[in-house]
Every structure is written in structure tokens, then in C-alpha cells.
């Protein structure tokens, strides 16, 4: 208990020091001005609340791994905000499905438009509701995904950072793609749209999309001060490869039963490292540190979840406004989350020999991005990874985060139920909304999990 308290206090102070230093560096008057312009910054500055959610009920090394991930999330928030403060002359906006390696190799500063819509609900569960309402009040259909509705709300409210240009794509879904038409009209800045082929598992698609990336680079050189530095891109890709190698080693460790690490150090580290910080040494080091903690647990015969009774796969994006779902499930039923659909991938390494080989490697990564590769093409694209993960990690159940705004995955649930019945795999589909607690809140999600665990798994609460 004392060790966990020390972990909490140490990282709480460290995170606040980093944020206070950012404020002092920016200056009090400029900070107040920017807080008025971007009031959502207050939510991001409160990121330390994640420590209480994800650290307090965990075993010591598991708690420390979570604290390290949260600390790096705070560092990313600061880095993103410093781009808003100081780099307006080279700032571009980009979609979450288009990672920033090329932009950074060109010397550009980036802001991922979905950044707030993903991160803010982790900190303040109801923070997206005002932006969802803004979009719906302007005529956006209420039944589309709440993440693009949130992004449109930020644009309509004037809460997106100023930028020179914007890069987006036709991923991951119709709602996400269509949102950028409204954002483009509201911001009135040049936009480049990457075209990802419908069938992307072939060499023709790789050739086609690598040419799309070449056109994007030429377009950015025309509309921004950025210039392509292939040596810098090679450095970024090589560092990304090292990060992917460290992650693969961590995945090998968690195949052990009971697992030496689980949940947020697996999926939140991936969400942060591969979407916001690819090619940065700080991200590689985070995965290495988590792996070191897992190895120590394994060496000493310790497990991440104190009473691991069940091992689960989470499919679809995590429950953003109930980020501590698995902290609760671990304590209540001994459910350990081992892998999720947003983290698992089959294209970890980039060939850095030539500019063309790097672009082809990045093409595969973008075309096979999470959500996109699962909901484009034939239905096999949705199921193959799922059942492979179930066997590879020796799991006991599949949990589907059944976001009601995701029409692609909702349409596949019937087939999924049949396949799980045939394979005798316990399946839980949680009905909820990704960003809107008014649809299904924390208590509603817990009730669905309890019903599944008691009626299907015949499990009793461990904490009562």
C-alpha cells in the first residue's frame, strides 16, 4: 500500500511540475489568453485524474506501468499544446488515421483533429457532450459516430487550433470521412485527401497508395514551409521499428498465464505511442520500461491482476468515458484484458533502405490502420484477427465495445454471434456510445458486464 501511494504521489507531482513549467514558459498572460480561446485546455491539464482511476487498485508494478503511461500522455499533451502556442507558422491538422511520421520529417508541427475527442473523455467523461450537441443542433445526423460529431463540434465552436493546411483520408468510415467536408468549409484552409483502396491487401494497392503519399508530400511543400527530409524520415522510421520490436516482446510476455502485465499499459501505450509519438525515443523507452516491469513480475512469479480468473479480448475502441472499466472488472471478477483490436497489428516494421521502401511501409501501416482494416472489404477482415488473438493469447472470452454509432461493426454482430456459438466462445457485446454518457453511462455498462459474468460465465463477484 505504501509503495503504491509513493508511486501515485511521485507521478502526481512530476506531472504537475511538467504542466506548471509549460505554463511558466508560455507566460501567465498568454496562457490566460489561450485558455479563453481554447477552454478545453483545462480538461487536458486535469489529466492527473487518470492516476486515481488507473493506479489506485492495481498491484505495484502494474500500478507503476500505468503511472508511466499517464506521465507520457501528459508529456504528449504538453508537446501538442506547445505546437499550438509557438508553431502556428508551420502547423497542420491531420486525421487520426493518418499518422504523423511524414509530417514531422518535413519539419511541420501537427495537431490530430480527433485528439481532444479521444483524450478528454478519459479525463472528464461528459466533456464531449457539449460538442456533440453543437453538431446535432447544426443538423448533423444524431445516429452517426460521436467521435466525428465531436470533431465537427470543435470546428463549429472555433476550438480547433489555427493551421495552414489539413490532411485527411477516406478512412475509417462514412461518418468519419464526411465530417471533414464540414470541417473544411468551417476552417477554409487547403485540404489534401488520401485515397485508400477498398481492397488493400495486395501489391497494386501498396504501389497506388505510396504514390498518394508522394502527391501529399508535393502538395504540402506547395502549401506549407515544410520540406521533405528523407534522412529524417529514416531516423523516425527506424525508431518506430525499435518501438514496435519492444511492443512485440511485451506481447510475448503477456501470453503467459497468469499475465505479468495487462490492460492500459498494453492498449493505452499503443494508442499514444503509435498515433502521437511514433519515431520518438521517449515512446520506445516507455515500451521498454513496461516490458522490464513485466519481466520482473514474471521472474518473481507475480501477476498483474491479483486474482486473474479470466483473460479477455476487447474489440473496437475502448470505452472512453469509462476508461477504468477493466480496473473495475479486475477487482469484481478477476477479468484481465490482454489485447484489443486497436493495438493488434501485423505490419510492425518499415524497410528503411530507400525513400520508396519507407513510403511502402508507411502505406501498409496507414491502409491497415485499426478499425479501417477490420471494416473494409469482406467480412473476413473483421473476424480473422479476432479469432487468431483469442487462440494466440489463450483467452477465455471476447468483449465487444458495441458503440451504437458504428454502423459497420453493428452490422456484423449477428454473424459474430453465430461464429462464437459455433466455436463455443463466450461473447459479451456492450451497448454504449463512445463519447456520450447520456446514451449508456458507467452504471449501465457495469450492469451489462454483471449480467454476462453471472449468467454466461457463472461467476460470482470477488469484491462482495
Image: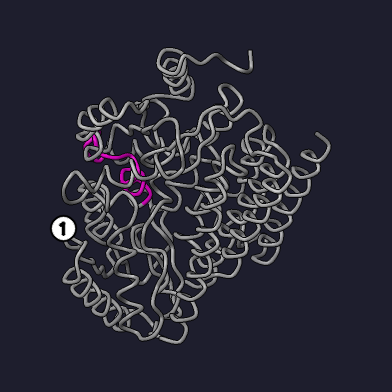
User: For this view, does 266 lie left or right of residue 409?
Assistant: right
Is residue 24 rendered magenta in the image? no
Q: Secondary structure at mark 1?
A: loop
Please rate how many residues cluster around mark 1, counting C-alpha atoms within 10 Å: few if below 14, some from 14 to 19, many from 20: some
User: For this view, does 255 lie left or right of residue 216?
Assistant: right
Task: Say if 356 sits above or below 450 in the image.
Answer: below
Q: Please tell me in which quadrant of the rendered image residue 7 appears.
A: top right
Frontmost residue, 340 versus 448: 340
Residue depicted at x 33% and y 32%: 402
Frontmost residue, 277 versus 111: 277
Residue beneath disc 1: 198
Residue depicted at x 33% and y 39%: 146
Residue 89 in sight from this viewpoint: no
Residue 44 position in % (x across, y down): 56, 48
State how the image is colored.
Answer: one colour
Task: Say if 262 sits above or below 113 in the image.
Answer: above
Residue 463 position in % (x across, y down): 63, 17
Is residue 141 rendered magenta in the image? yes
The quarter of the image holding the C terminus is: top right
The quarter of the image holding the N terminus is: top right
Residue depicted at x 40% and y 48%: 342
Task: Say if 36 sits above or below 122 in the image.
Answer: below
Residue 13 position in % (x across, y down): 76, 50
Residue 225 in sight from this viewpoint: yes
User: For this view, does 7 lie left or right of residue 104?
Assistant: right
Frontmost residue, 188 versus 417: 417
Start-end of magenta stretch? 138-154
User: For this view, does 463 lie left or right of residue 456?
Assistant: right
Task: Say if 19 sits above or below 262 in the image.
Answer: below
Residue 451 position in % (x across, y down): 43, 15
Residue depicted at x 62% and y 38%: 54
Amino acid at each position: 500500500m505504501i509503495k503504491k501511494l509513493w508511486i501515485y504521489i511521485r507521478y502526481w507531482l512530476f506531472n504537475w511540475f511538467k504542466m506548471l513549467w509549460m505554463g511558466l514558459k508560455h507566460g501567465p498572460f498568454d496562457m490566460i489568453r489561450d485558455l479563453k480561446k481554447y477552454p478545453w485546455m483545462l480538461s487536458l491539464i486535469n489529466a492527473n485524474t487518470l492516476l486515481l482511476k488507473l493506479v489506485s487498485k492495481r498491484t505495484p508494478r502494474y500500478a507503476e506501468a500505468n503511472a508511466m503511461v499517464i506521465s507520457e500522455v501528459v508529456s504528449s499533451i504538453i508537446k501538442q499544446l506547445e505546437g499550438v502556442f509557438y508553431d502556428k507558422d508551420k502547423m497542420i491538422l491531420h486525421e487520426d488515421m493518418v499518422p504523423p511520421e511524414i509530417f514531422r520529417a518535413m519539419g511541420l508541427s501537427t495537431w490530430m483533429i480527433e485528439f481532444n475527442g479521444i483524450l478528454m473523455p478519459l479525463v472528464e467523461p461528459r466533456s464531449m457532450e457539449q460538442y456533440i450537441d453543437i453538431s446535432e443542433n447544426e443538423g448533423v445526423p444524431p445516429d452517426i459516430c460521436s467521435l466525428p460529431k465531436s470533431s465537427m463540434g470543435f470546428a463549429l465552436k472555433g476550438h480547433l487550433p489555427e493551421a495552414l493546411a489539413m490532411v485527411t483520408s477516406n478512412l475509417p468510415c462514412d461518418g468519419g470521412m464526411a465530417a471533414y467536408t464540414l470541417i473544411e468549409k468551417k476552417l477554409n484552409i487547403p485540404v489534401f485527401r488520401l485515397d485508400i483502396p477498398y481492397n488493400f491487401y495486395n501489391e497494386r494497392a501498396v504501389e497506388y497508395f505510396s504514390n498518394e503519399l508522394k502527391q501529399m508530400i508535393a502538395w504540402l511543400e506547395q502549401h506549407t514551409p515544410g520540406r521533405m527530409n528523407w534522412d529524417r524520415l529514416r531516423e523516425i522510421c527506424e525508431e518506430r521499428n525499435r518501438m514496435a520490436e519492444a511492443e512485440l516482446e511485451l506481447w510475448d510476455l503477456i501470453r503467459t498465464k497468469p499475465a505479468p502485465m495487462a490492460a492500459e499499459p498494453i492498449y493505452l501505450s499503443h494508442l499514444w505511442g503509435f498515433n502521437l509519438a511514433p519515431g520518438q525515443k521517449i515512446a520506445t523507452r516507455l515500451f521498454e520500461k513496461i516490458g522490464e516491469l513485466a519481466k520482473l513480475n514474471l521472474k518473481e512469479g507475480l501477476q498483474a491482476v491479483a486474482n486473474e480468473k479470466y483473460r479477455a479480448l476487447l474489440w473496437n475502441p475502448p470505452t472512453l468515458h469509462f476508461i477504468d472499466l477493466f480496473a473495475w472488472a479486475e477487482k469484481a471478477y478477476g477479468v484481465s484484458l490482454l489485447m484489443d483490436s486497436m493495438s493488434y497489428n501485423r505490419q510492425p516494421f518499415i524497410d528503411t533502405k530507400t525513400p520508396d521502401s519507407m513510403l511502402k511501409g508507411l502505406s501498409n501501416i496507414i491502409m491497415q490502420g485499426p478499425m479501417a482494416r477490420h471494416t473494409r472489404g469482406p467480412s473476413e477482415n473483421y473476424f480473422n484477427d479476432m479469432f487468431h488473438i483469442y487462440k494466440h493469447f489463450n483467452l477465455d472470452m471476447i468483449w465487444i465495445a458495441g458503440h451504437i454509432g458504428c454502423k459497420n461493426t453493428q452490422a456484423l454482430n449477428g454473424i459474430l454471434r453465430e461464429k462464437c456459438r459455433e466455436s463455443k466462445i463466450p461473447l459479451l457485446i456492450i451497448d454504449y456510445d463512445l463519447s456520450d454518457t447520456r446514451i449508456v453511462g458507467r452504471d449501465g455498462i457495469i450492469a451489462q458486464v454483471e449480467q454476462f459474468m453471472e449468467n454466461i460465465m457463472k461467476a460470482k463477484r470477488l469484491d462482495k
